[in-house]
Amino acid sequence: MQRRNFVKKATLSSMAGLIGAEIVFGNLLPKGYRPLALQDPDPFKMFDKDPEMVVLNSKPWNMEARAHLLNDKVTPNKFMFIRNNGIIPEKIDVQNWTLTIDGESADQTKTYSLAELKSKFKHHTYQLTLECGGNGRSEFDPPAKGNQWTIGAVSCAEWTGVRLRDVLEDVGIGSDAVYVGYHGADMHLSRDPNKEPISRGVPMQKALQDETLLAFQMNGEDIPIAHGHPLRLVAGGWPASVSGKWINRISIRNKEHDGEKMGGSSYRVPCKPVAPGEKVKDEDMCVIESMPVKSLITYPKSGATFPKSKSLNIKGHAWAGELEVSKVEYSIDFGSTWAPCTLEKPANRLAWQHFSAQIRFPVVGYYEVWARATDSNGKAQPMLLPGWNPKGYLNNACHRIAVKVT
Ligand SMILES: Nc1nc2c(c(=O)[nH]1)N[C@H]1C(S)=C(S)[C@@H](COP(=O)(O)O)O[C@H]1N2
Ligand SMILES: [Mo]
């Protein structure tokens, strides 16, 4: 006869709390069984993602790609990472969606409907690299709290929208303007309407760049819901946290924006290098601006096996925040020697650049292929880890893949 393990009373009442109703016959629930009402819907179906994507968190939804999934020159939705701080807006009324521009340094407060934004201002399309500031966090020691991103929180999709500059100028930018801050329609995890999950921004100079968009399309279609439909800010080359999703308000500020996740250790790193694990005072932390140079080998998939008779054609992308990538090199001897890769120009400023190389291996056996990019200021990626920081941001270490030659 099978023995049934019944769930504890305490667990039962907490589950009832989550469901919002008493679980009748709850005392008969088998141990370890999660009532359907509490099971997650299939995120791959819900967000139209490839089944090889990796879910890091379901509350809120956070999902990353693997290196080999990012081989496309322009990232399609199915391989694009999702980073949410709160709950995706549940009802989006596109017809009545509005964007309000306000703030101490706005000449007036002005509200636009989506249709007005689309008809009044010229449309622009750019490929823009978006990388989460915490991409690579999982490698830091001592570990940092937060989603344990490996290398997959980066994308380069094609975004279409209007220039933020054109809209801000239509409203009128005060002479004392220093920053813009965004507000989105997503909900705080606590569902408290007075709390925002995130409200970040950029200095005016970044806000006024040609490539900083208020986008309504991604890869030629409506932006997918998880990525900010119907309107998102896209500021390529900076931590993607400044690219606000589900945007309904932008404030022109006369000081550094002080919204949620602008202070403390959020998206900030020690202004000067610190020892791993060191406590850093708030006033010694600086806001992350342009992202550091980085590259990713997207072909072949790590672990691939190749015959020695053939050369291996590696492929990947490299990006350098506000800068251009000036060279990418590869090494098959753990960084002792480096050889050049072929590097393409970006499709436009702030788009990632594609690289490739034909590699011949001297003898059969196990190898690692390492890639290292250098930016236009001559700064290269660190081989293993850059400086430690409390929240594990900005890990731009060289990407490495394993290859067996037979
Ligand atoms: N409204 C809103 N915008 C947001 C976020 C969010 O949680 N809410 N997350 C930010 C962070 S931290 C990142 S890395 C990017 C992720 O964009 P993606 O999910 O489209 O890849 O969106 C940014 N914009
Ligand atoms: Mo992020």
Image (spheres, rainbow, N blue to C red):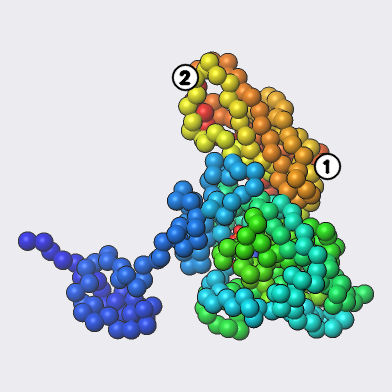
Tell me if the residue at label 1 has its CB under 8 Å from ligand 2: no
Residue extending furthest toward the front? 119
- Viewer-closest of 140 and 44: 44
Query: Residue 377 — which label?
Result: 1
x, y (%) of residue 62? 52, 60
Image mark count: 2
Q: Residues within 10 Å of mark 2 (few under 14, many from 20)?
A: few
Of circles 1 and 2, the one toward us is 2
What amino acid is at disc 2? Thr
**Towards the viewer: 205 or 140:** 205
Left or right: 334 with respect to 253?
A: left
Place residue 72 in its image quadrant: top right
Mark 2 residue element = loop
- First-in-chain label (1 vs 2): 1
Taking the image as four quarters, which one is ligand 1 found in? bottom right
Tell me what residue is drawn at x 60 percent, y 27 percent. 313
Q: Is residue 138 left or right of residue 5?
A: right
Query: Is any atom of residue 238 visible in this view?
Result: no
Place of residue 226 in the rendered image (x, y in percent of width and height, measured from the top left): 56, 64
Residue drawn at point x = 71 percent, y = 38 percent: 373
Residue matched to label 2: 406
Q: Amino acid at mark 1?
A: Asn
Tell me which corner region of the image, top left, top right, bottom left or bottom right, holds residue 124.
bottom right
Decide which of 120, 208 is in the foreground and name it.
120
